[in-house]
Amino acid sequence: MNKLKKIILISLLIFIILYSINYFLSSTNQSKELNLEKETSFNQKLNNSIKLGIDFLHNTQLENGEFKTESCFEKKMINCYYDSSPFVTTFVLYSINEINNSKVQEIKEKALNFLLNEQENGLWSYWTKKNENKLYFDLDDTSCSSFILKQNNISFQENIHLIKNNKNNENLYYTWIDPIRFENDVDCAVNVNVLLYLQENNPHVCSYINNAINNNETCSIYYPDKFALYYLVSRAYKNNITCLNQTKGKIISEILSNYKQNKTFENPLQTALVINTLLNFEYNDKKTLELLIDDLIKNQNKNGSWNKSSFYIQPQSIHYGSEELTTAISIEALNNYQKI
């Protein structure tokens, strides 16, 4: 009898062990399947969001290849008007440059021709030739236009000697080229864009930018939103301006601190700028990035666009941006996230 009890107990114990193992394996497989389904669903959301954004840009690109710039009298971007400029188009082109589909190719071809036609002796002004407003040539528009044309292997008139001669006594780049009616200025964001085009790890310029950011100093006249400046710095860093790596830790820390405190950012443009900045600086915490990406997708409009916000300013008067600009930078963020 005792022997029979032992056999029954052992058999029962074996059954319990086998059942537990089977249950554990089944639960693990179900969990893996759920995670795979979740990941697949998230990737589908990303792809759909990018497609809608590209469709919007394709539908709203102007006949001459330009993307709209809107000038607004308030930071809330109300009371705005179309203000023809090559500048926004340079950012749209950069943001979609790594996406390979037929609509993007059509967009790029028209937009690159538009930029090339706005060149005057190797230089660009903020306003287009058709704009009634006129302004001096500047290094911001010239550098951004030149960089994107060079990136796409399109030739234009040589301008490097003019740019390199446009410095102050501290070897920092002036914004304007030979202004007559007003005093020239030095802006750290403009200097970042100059380094990007020249592919120059200039120690004087990098030291100026690194020190300003690490010491929380205001150094940009035209980009008062620090997240816009951070994006430009990270963009240059991603494209070989490695002397800016001394700002990397500070910028990531500032972004994460802001996000932890507020649980969100001010608008979709800021969210997109932040995502790109983190990814450009090789930040890889997928949980944080997924939350930011999800927030960005939730704020996409039905027509595929994201709302306009102020990206840069004319000091004390005008805020500039557009749905096209926000949409392009948002697409860049989604596409960059897919690569990690």
Image (spheres, helix red, strand yellow):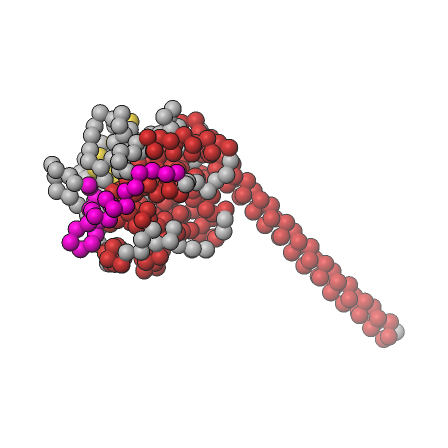
Judge by depth and name the residue closer to the eye, 111 or 20. 111
**Residue depicted at x 29% and y 34%:** 119
Q: Does the magenta stretch include residue 176?
A: yes
Judge by depth and name the residue closer to the eye, 225 or 131. 131
**Residue depicted at x 31% and y 56%:** 201
Where does residue 238 sit, x and y in percent of width and height?
39, 52
Residue 210 falls in image quadrant? bottom left
**Residue depicted at x 38% and y 53%:** 240
Judge by depth and name the residue closer to the eye, 139 or 260. 139
**Residue depicted at x 44% and y 29%:** 58
Judge by depth and name the residue closer to the eye, 197 or 212. 197
Q: How would you classify the magenta stretch by its main secondary structure?
A: loop
Residue 97 falls in image quadrant? top left
Instruction: Check the image and report above or below for 83 versus 139.
Output: above
Q: Is residue 16 magenta?
A: no
Tell me the magenta residue range. Answer: 154-177
Where does residue 339 sit, x and y in percent of width and height?
50, 48
Horizontally, residue 53 falls left or right of residue 159, namely right
Q: Quarter holding the N terminus? A: bottom right
Where does residue 132 sit, x and y in percent of width and height?
22, 25
Horizontally, residue 31 falls left or right of residue 56, namely right
Instruction: Check the image and report above or below for 268 versus 216.
Output: above
Q: How many marks?
A: 0
Instruction: Check the image and report above or below for 148 versus 85.
Output: below
Q: Which residue lies furthest to the bottom in this view?
A: 2
Where does residue 145 sit, x and y in percent of width and height?
32, 39
